[in-house]
Amino acid sequence: MITTGREDISKWASRIDTVIANTPQCCVNRVVVVESTPSTMDAAQAFAGESCGVLLVASQQTSGRGQRGRVWQDGDRCTLPCTFVLDTSGVDPVMLSAMIGCAVHETIRDVAPSSSDLMIKWPNDIVIREQGKDEHVDLKIAGILIEQRERMTSIGIGINCVQGQGDWGADIQSKATSLSQIGAQISRLDLVCSLVEHLSYWLGAQDRAGARSYYQANDAMVHTRRSFQYDNRNFEGVVECIDPLDCIVLQTPTGTHRLPIAQTQHVRK
């Protein structure tokens, strides 16, 4: 089993503070670093209280949560688990989700080998596409969880860093990968500093055309068969296009359907 061990995180906060001070339009103004917490989402919300602009980073997360009640598997200090609590009043939630996906993808892209096929899998995963014997396989390398409460948005991000093949549970062994497994070398501290910079850029730019273009250039779903739920109906077919700010265009046996992004759920199998 590959683990990072108990790192000295005593200087993490000061290093991240320096990045915050030197990042134009930084999305956070305060960082909290903890050795261990059950959930960075819960801990960040507790530390933030009624204030925004908070980033909480943990060396270890023991009960991380994912979308729709799923569990996020961290291993023993194998991931980068962090949560941003931001004031997103006036920001379209659909646009926000797209920008976060672009920022996390860009953070990993900067350290991934050029041969890695790194993609965004709507709505909340970053994946590495590998070509199998008969078809491709998308291996999850990062996940995003967004929770909104009035003007406050909690953005939980988990990036798989140093897991080896033996670190995965049997249920996800064939579905996940890590930076280490694809040959990327970066410390977790450097990774979170880069994430602060990229997320601040995308949130500060508010570039709708740029977000749409970047997302679609790295879309993992286009030309694949998927199932979605919209308006209490299930739709299954081949994805022709995903516009992360508007709709999913799906070709089904009954014709072409345009499913609005904000009201559609991906049905995982």
Image (cartoon, rainbow, N blue to C red):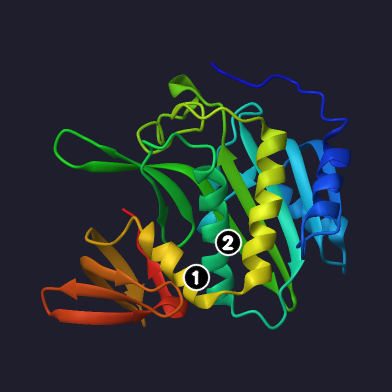
In the orientation shown, which residue stands out farthest toward the left?
253
- Residue 60 against residue 70 in the figure, above or below: above
Q: Position of residue 25 (x, y in %)?
A: 77, 65
Q: Nearer the viewer, residue 235 or 10?
A: 10
Mark 2 burial class by Cα count in 10 Å: few <14, some 14-19, many 20+: many
| Mark drawn on residue 100 | 2
Answer whether labels 1 and 2 touch (C-beta < 8 Å).
Answer: no
Q: Quadrant of residue 4?
A: top right
Q: Give whichever of discs 1 and 2 has the lower sequence position.
A: 2
User: What residue is shown at x 10% (from left), y 74% (from top)?
Assistant: 253
Q: Is residue 83 left or right of residue 170?
A: right
- Residue 217 against residue 172 in the figure, above or below: below
Element type where label 2 sits in the image: helix
- Residue 188 against residue 218 in the figure, above or below: above
- The amino acid type of the residue labelled 2 equals Ile
Q: Does residue 70 appear in this view?
A: no
User: What residue is shown at x 37% (from left), y 60% (from top)?
Assistant: 217
Q: Which residue in the structure is indicated by mark 1?
A: 210
- Residue 228 against residue 82 in the figure, above or below: below
Q: Position of residue 213 (x, y in %)?
A: 42, 68
- Please tell me whether mark 1 or mark 2 is closer to you in this view: 1
Element type where label 1 sits in the image: helix
In the orientation shown, which residue stands out farthest toward the top?
1
User: What residue is shown at x 40% (from left), y 35% (from top)?
Assistant: 171
Q: Does residue 238 appear in this view?
A: yes
Q: Is residue 10 left or right of residue 100?
A: right
Mark 1 burial class by Cα count in 10 Å: few <14, some 14-19, many 20+: some
Q: Is residue 89 left or right of residue 209?
A: right
User: What residue is shown at x 59% (from left), y 57% (from top)?
Assistant: 145
| Mark drawn on residue 243 | none
Q: How many marks?
A: 2
